[in-house]
Image (cartoon, rainbow, N blue to C red):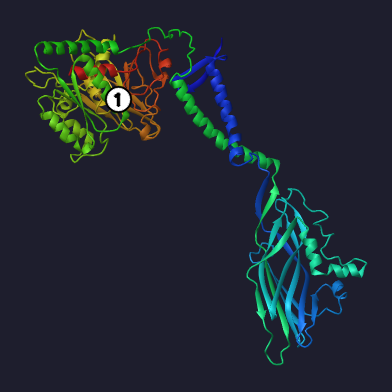
């Protein structure tokens, strides 16, 4: 049955299953859940997934129709009779009320403050003459406007600004200020909302009715308000602290006047409207994506846990052995460490037979790095398996590491010390080097099982192989990771020529090391150069050539590309370097190939050691030449394993950890 990939994480984890399997059904249900959950989420929290209405803001276009009705109610001081005073500038209404009509001054002012072509406010001032025995008890005023919306919805209607006031005491005037605000009972449509209700053909005051009684009724303020409030969309006049002026004029000889001032502001309005289809789809798509991305992220974490922990029944067909190119092979370094581990066990047994305690290895852990803690646990298991005593000392404050180191150096029971770095990282010490380097030099050479203290490093770089030179009875301890690479190369054919004396067994070989740390790259380059190889040491910002005990720096690189020829006594070298990416990601792309073969005299690299501590770096497979030995010392795969094993004669060592651990115990 055909199998398909149901889950993949990076390039290293794949899970394939037939279509009729629990794993395939699990993935289908999870993907369906991620697509459906957003609908239930919004229905549960917002009530509805699809929007029905929308709002927007618009300043309406308001035009004053120059129609004013003012109705005053007065009482007589002599007879206590109440009568109405009707003031209007609508001639067709004035002639119908000759007994109550009174001629008054009316002034209008229209202001466009922001000069956008739309009026921002209207001001009405009117002075109504009064008889000496009249006193005003109440007042009503109507202003008529033409109200238009044109931005998203279209609305064309007649609106009014209405205000009223009454007082027990007589009033001499009234000052009102407010805003004309839109009030909707229903949302407006996105198309023309004009109808017989809102069109100009249905005015609030019918001045052309043939019956005078109807026309008089139309001029009644209450009748106008009844017609106006029956609409579903109106513009209300909202007052802000109106002021009633009480009393009468006390200036002798001055005519009695009732002064009315009314200012109407036109602010920006918020309009409720029916959303269009495109707006509904756009809003729904944005909400859906905002939730579905989170759903896929969370569900993928669950899938990663399910497939990573093998919680579903495995249905994996027997895998066929990988097909490699002729002569290409993948090297398991575990067997290389076995002889050293066996030697350690034999030595421990001899000590036990003689009544001597097994050696004590002390580990110092002063950080919360999971990798360092895991390495410390692995060291303890390996020591117990080989019969070596192991004591892990956890230090809470890193500043106390130096004191703990000196105590361990002076303790006669301690035979070896291993410090789990990093502790301070690249923080500088008072001596000028980094604080971690300072701690490495603090370890006594008698207890240093890592070979990283100053005595061992200086001897290594000067090719001094014994601590008690010139008696040469005790060998120097070499950095374990670098030594493990040397021992692995020594066990492989075509790397070391055993027919030559020590120090010349790698003559004629070219090695490229993509790492220059104090723990791996730098000591490994020195060790291989001490065995006669030409070693190119590559770091993010420089390239060095180790040859014949001398160090040559390849200068002239640029961040983009560089071609530089280095002249020595043997031949010309053409070194090509391409650097990309930020410094933190180390080397994105380094060499093609070092040295570039420009003549028959330029050798190709026989050995490539990769130690780039980032998962983003991959050594391009097309740079690898046939019959090349590749050793990966990084915790990440720096090569594409499937591709390089398709190159003829390639020997690939994916990890060196087991051999490194064996040398710790051996020392």
| Direction left: furthest residue | 471
Is the C terminus in the top left, top right, bottom left or bottom right quadrant? top left
Residue 507 visible, this orientation:
no
Q: Position of residue 241 (x, y in %)?
A: 63, 70
Residue at point 12%, 11% (across, down): 350
Q: Position of residue 220 (x, y in %)?
A: 82, 69
Q: Residues within 10 Å of mark 1 (few under 14, many from 20)?
A: few
Q: What residue is shown with label 1?
A: 374
Please state if 466 lies on the left or on the right of 326 as rendered: left
Residue 415, placed above or below residue 63? above
Quadrant position of residue 661: top left
Q: Nearer the viewer, residue 552 or 71?
A: 71
Residue 367, placed above or below residue 329? below
Q: Position of residue 175 (x, y in %)?
A: 67, 75
Residue 38 visible, this orientation:
yes
Residue at point 74%, 59% (across, down): 234
| Direction front: furthest residue | 80
Q: Nearer the viewer, residue 463 or 39?
A: 39
| Direction right: furthest residue | 210
Please state if 472 lies on the left or on the right of 9 as rendered: left
Assign a secondary structure to mark 1.
helix
Is the N terminus in the top left, top right, bottom left or bottom right quadrant? top right
Quadrant position of residue 139: bottom right
Quadrant position of residue 353: top left
Residue 400, placed above or below residue 502? below
Total count of labels: 1
Residue at point 21%, 12% (across, down): 340
Q: Position of residue 563 (x, y in %)?
A: 36, 28
Please state if 191 lies on the left or on the right of 214 as rendered: left
Q: Nearer the viewer, residue 118 or 208?
A: 208
């Amino acid at each position: 049955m055909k199998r398909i990939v149901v889950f993949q994480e990076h390039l290293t984890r794949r899970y394939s299953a037939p279509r009729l399997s629990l794993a395939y059904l699990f993935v289908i249900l999870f993907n369906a859940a991620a697509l459906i959950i957003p609908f239930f989420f919004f229905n549960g929290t917002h009530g509805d997934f699809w929007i029905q209405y929308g709002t927007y803001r618009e300043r309406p276009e308001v035009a004053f129709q120059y129609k004013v009705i003012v109705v005053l109610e007065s009482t007589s001081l002599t007879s206590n009779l109440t009568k109405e005073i009707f003031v209007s500038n609508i001639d067709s209404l004035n002639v119908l009320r000759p007994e109550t009509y009174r001629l008054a001054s009316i002034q209008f002012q229209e202001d466009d403050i922001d000069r956008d072509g739309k009026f921002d406010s209207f001001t009405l001032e009117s002075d109504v003459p009064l008889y000496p025995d009249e006193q005003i008890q109440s007042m009503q005023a109507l202003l008529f406007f033409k109200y238009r919306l044109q931005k998203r919805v279209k609305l064309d209607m007649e609106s009014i600004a209405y205000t009223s006031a009454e007082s027990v005491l007589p009033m001499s005037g009234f000052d009102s200020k407010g805003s004309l605000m839109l009030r909707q009972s229903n949302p407006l449509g996105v198309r023309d909302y004009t109808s017989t209700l809102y069109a100009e053909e249905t005015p609030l005051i019918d001045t052309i009715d043939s019956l005078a009684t109807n026309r008089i009724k139309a001029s009644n303020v209450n009748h106008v308000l009844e017609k106006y409030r029956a609409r579903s969309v109106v513009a209300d006049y909202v007052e802000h602290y109106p002021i009633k002026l009480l009393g009468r004029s006390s200036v002798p000889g001055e005519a009695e006047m009732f002064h009315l001032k009314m200012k109407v502001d036109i602010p920006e309005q918020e309009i409720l409207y029916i959303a269009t289809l495109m707006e509904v789809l756009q809003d729904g798509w944005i909400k859906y994506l905002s939730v579905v991305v989170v759903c896929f992220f969370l569900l993928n974490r669950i899938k990663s846990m399910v497939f990573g922990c093998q919680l579903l029944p495995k249905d994996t067909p027997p895998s066929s052995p990988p097909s490699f190119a002729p002569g290409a092979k993948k090297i398991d370094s575990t067997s290389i460490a076995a002889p050293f581990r066996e030697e350690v066990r034999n030595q421990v047994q001899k000590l036990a037979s003689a009544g001597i305690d097994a050696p004590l290895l002390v580990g110092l852990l002063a950080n919360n790095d999971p990798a360092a803690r895991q390495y410390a646990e692995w060291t303890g298991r390996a020591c117990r398996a080989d019969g070596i005593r192991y004591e892990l000392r956890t230090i809470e404050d890193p500043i106390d590491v130096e004191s703990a180191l000196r105590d361990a150096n002076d303790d006669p029971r301690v035979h070896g010390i291993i410090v789990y770095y990093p502790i301070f990282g690249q923080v500088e010490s008072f001596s000028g080097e980094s604080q971690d380097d300072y701690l490495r030099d603090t370890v006594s050479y008698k207890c240093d099982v890592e070979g990283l203290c100053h005595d061992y490093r200086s001897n290594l770089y000067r090719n001094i192989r014994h601590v008690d030179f010139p008696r040469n009875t005790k060998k120097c301890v070499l950095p374990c990771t670098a030594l493990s690479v040397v021992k692995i190369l020594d066990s492989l054919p075509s790397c070391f020529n055993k027919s030559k004396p020590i120090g010349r067994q790698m003559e004629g070989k070219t090695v490229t090391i993509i790492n220059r740390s104090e723990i791996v790259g730098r000591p490994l380059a020195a060790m291989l150069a001490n065995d006669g190889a030409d070693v190119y040491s590559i770091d993010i910002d420089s390239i060095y050539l180790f040859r014949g005990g001398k160090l040559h720096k390849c200068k002239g690189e640029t961040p983009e590309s560089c071609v530089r020829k280095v002249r020595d006594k043997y031949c010309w070298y053409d070194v090509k370097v391409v650097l990309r990416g930020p410094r933190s990601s180390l080397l994105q792309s380094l060499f093609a190939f070092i040295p570039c073969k420009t003549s028959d005299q330029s050798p190709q690299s026989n050995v490539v050691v990769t130690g780039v501590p980032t998962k983003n770096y991959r050594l391009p497979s097309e740079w690898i030449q046939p019959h090349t030995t590749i050793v990966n010392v990084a915790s990440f795969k720096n090569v594409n394993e499937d591709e390089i094993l398709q190159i003829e004669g390639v020997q690939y060592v994916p990890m060196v950890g087991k051999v490194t651990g064996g040398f710790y115990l051996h020392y």
